[in-house]
Amino acid sequence: MKTTIKKAGSHVGNEVTIGCWLANKRSSGKIAFLQLRDGTGFIQGVVVKNEVGEELFKKAKEITQESSLYIKGVIQEDDRAPSGYELTVTGIEVIQQAEDYPITPKEHGTEFLMDNRHLWIRSKKQHATLRIRHEIIQATYEFFDKEGFIKVDPPILTGNSAEGTTNLFHTKYFDEDAFLSQSGQLYMEAAAMAFNRVFSFGPTFRAEKSKTRRHLIEFWMIEPEMAFVEHEESLEIQEQYVSYVVQAVLKNCRQELKALERDTSKLEQISAPFPRITYDEAIDILKKEGQEVEWGEDFGAPHETIIAEKFDKPVFITHYPKDIKAFYMKPDPGREDVVLCADLIAPEGYGEIIGGSQRIDDLELLKDRYNEHNLSEEAYGWYLDLRKYGTVPHSGFGLGLERTVAWISGTEHVRETIPFPRLLNRLYP
Ligand code: 4AD
Ligand code: MG
């Protein structure tokens, strides 16, 4: 019977066939241990010479790393195995005997591994990280569906920029100019006026010349937008969402977290509510820590890390100065120099995972912002319409998937949290 490693538990004592690859092997004169992987998991295949005979034993010993196989064998329970099962091999069909595989069990440099990313994603830790990415996506759909949000897909090719014009990828759209989307937000605001609560999940592009462990050129963002929701309520939804995702990974990715040696005690305590501090309070903290930062400046990664270290949960920094934030953010009615926004900073130095705000709902105020930011009514007129025809208080936010995967999986650099990262110096593979 054909099965997968993941389903081994339902076939104990039976002979099964598994399509797989050889990850590694060890052998002596009498016994060979084949580390097998099929994409659903890892299992050890045991080949005993006295039981399988000379010919099959020789075949097993000659299989090269990453050769593709159909392996036949009997599933055995085994408490010592990480998966809990082992395979007593009874037959081997080699589909292809692999050439010398570049990624050997020895240590390799990151650039080499990145050049071989198309193969590297087969490795145990990379596999685990990307499996956690999948779990976070699953939990995201579950959470928002449960909360009554409709998934809406904003365009990738667009004439508008949401987050400023400095880091846009420019392209031709027949005779017009177009950009790759930096954020679907403006479209999601239109969608919220049609469906009340919406979320998107898609790729976004930023031509940022930043070469840090937190920046990708192409990254995936989850962008919820909610009608009749003000700043404070939006923060509550954010903390519930992030807690839900962390708990889903803890529940469903135990093996992956173990493979990555993630300290899960730090994740266990992630539950709503999260602490909130204002930008002003953040400035005070940084000054007390001896940082040279003045009111009105944006925070860099080291600043975020200093603040994150004060808390064991993600922390919201709210009410940033209006001048360092996007044109669409609603000013605080009590204080016009700051806006009703929040960045959510992950613990353990993983940086900002969410940026969000309440949006300007007043037509005249938004028109003033257009003038200040030189936005043309020709290109952005449609966005003003949302304030002409039944405007309501509304808020939304964007969660960066890769930074969230990095934090939850404990992966140092975001390049390992996406299958094929686009980086400043990397367009291949
Ligand atoms: O803070 P940002 O720029 O916010 C927006 O784009 C809003 N329009 C979202 C919204 O309100 N709908 O980006 C949101 C998140 C950041 O907090 C960060 O996690 C991630 O996107 N992000 C990046 N991730 C990887 N590489 C980059 N270059 C990133 N830039 C932003
Ligand atoms: Mg931001």
Image: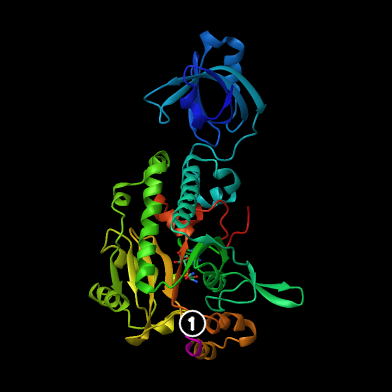
Helix, strand or loop for disc 1: loop
Most common SS among magenta residues? helix
Residue under the point 41% across and 72% down: 229
The spot of residue 167 in percent (x, y) is 56, 74
The spot of residue 321 in percent (x, y) is 38, 82
Q: Name the residue under label 1.
A: 327
Q: What stretch is highlighted in magenta?
A: 361-365
The stretch drawn in magenta includes residue 362:
yes
Q: Is residue 108 above or below residue 148?
A: above
Please name whichever residue, 284 or 326, is drawn nearer the observer in this view of the structure.
Answer: 326
The spot of residue 142 in percent (x, y) is 46, 52
Q: Quadrant of residue 72?
A: top right
The spot of residue 181 in percent (x, y) is 59, 69
Residue most extreme to the left: 288
The stretch drawn in magenta includes residue 130:
no
Residue under the point 60% across and 37% down: 101
Of the residues shown, which amino acid type is indicated by label 1? Phe
Residue most extreme to the front: 390
